Structure formats: C-alpha cells, structure tokens
Image: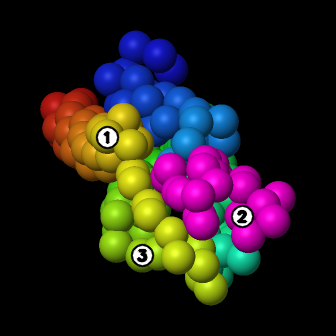
Amino acid sequence: MIQRIQTVFLAICAIVFILFCFIPLKQITVEGNPVSLTAFSGFTSKFAFNFTFSIVGGFNFVALASAVIAIFCYRERYLQIRFCYILAAISAMFIALLNFTDAVIGYSSTEVVPLATNIMLAASLISAILASVFIKKDINLLKKADRIR
C-alpha cells in the first residue's frame, strides 16, 4: 500500500541495500593497489578480507529481504515492526563494521569509507526507525477506531 508513509520509508531502506551491491562501501589501498569493497567483493577479491567483511554480502541480502518482506506484510503490523527493528540493527551494524574494523588482514593498507556510504546508512537507519514509529501510530489509530464502533 503506497499511500502509507511507512512504505516509503521501507522502500528507502530497500533501495539503499540494493545500491550497496554496486557502489563501493569502502575504498582500500593495499600495497599501492586501489580496491573498492562492495557488498559482494569479499567473495571475489584476491586479497584476504577480515571474516566480518566476508559476510557483508549475507548481511546485505538479509537487510534487503527484510525490507521487501516488511513492505508486503502491511496487514501484519507487529511483524512489520519486527522487520523494521531488524533493518535498524543491520544498518547500525553496517555503520560500526565499515567505520571501526579493518577490512584487509595481512597487508599494510589505507582504508577510507566514502561519505555517501555513511549518509545512506544513516538514512536507512532513520528510515527504519521512522517506519516503526508510523506503524505504531497505525496500530493505535486502528485500536481507537475499534473502540468507537
């Protein structure tokens, strides 16, 4: 149901995690060689990534699936709120993972997280929280309407 604002917020989350499949999450210079880390480059790179970066693609897929399922579970509002919490947790995990851990082990490297990545992760986190707030408002509105009848 597109007329509900929480659907728009959940769509923003889904778009962010779709973009993470293609845009660089982290720019790394390993021994003079520039490498762009996307959500799936932990599986296809010649460098040995830290274990946490090997599962970034899995986290990205879980977040994307959670956003899409939450969009289409509009009749099950309590389930939709749970998926919003999952999205918010994964967004916070991504922020911590990208900014506070090293991606490459065994090499001297310089790592930079693009500002656009952090902005999109913050937008996803805020969108998931706002979606859960508006879903709770829907639940309260329906309860009030049931009491009036």
Magenta stretch holds residue 29: yes
Asked if 124 appears above or below 51 in the picture, the reply is above
Quick check: 60 left or right of 80? right
Q: Residue at x 60, y 79 (%)?
A: 107
Quick check: 83 left or right of 129? right
- Residues at marks 2 and 1, CA–CA distance in whole angstroms: 21 Å
Asked if 3 appears above or below 137 in the picture, the reply is above
Residue denoted by label 2? 42
Q: Which residues are magenta?
A: 26-47
Q: Residue at x 60, y 66 (%)?
A: 31
Residue denoted by label 1? 115
Name the disc covering residue 78, or none: none
Q: Mark 3: which secondary structure? A: loop
Image coordinates for residue 92, horizontal then vertical, percent = 34, 62
Sequence-earlier tag: 3 or 2:
2
Say if mark 3 contacts mark 1, CB within 8 Å.
no
Total residue callouts: 3
Q: Residue at x 35, y 64 (%)?
A: 99
Residue in the foreground of this view, choosing between 126 and 48: 48
- Residues at marks 3 and 1, CA–CA distance in whole angstroms: 16 Å
The amino acid marked with disc number 1 is Leu
Residue in the foreground of this view, choosing between 61 and 108: 108
Say if mark 3 contacts mark 2, CB within 8 Å.
no
The amino acid marked with disc number 3 is Thr
Residue denoted by label 3? 101
Local packing at callout 2 (Cα closer than 10 Å; few below 14, some 14-19, many 20+) is: many
Image coordinates for residue 19, horizontal then vertical, percent = 58, 34
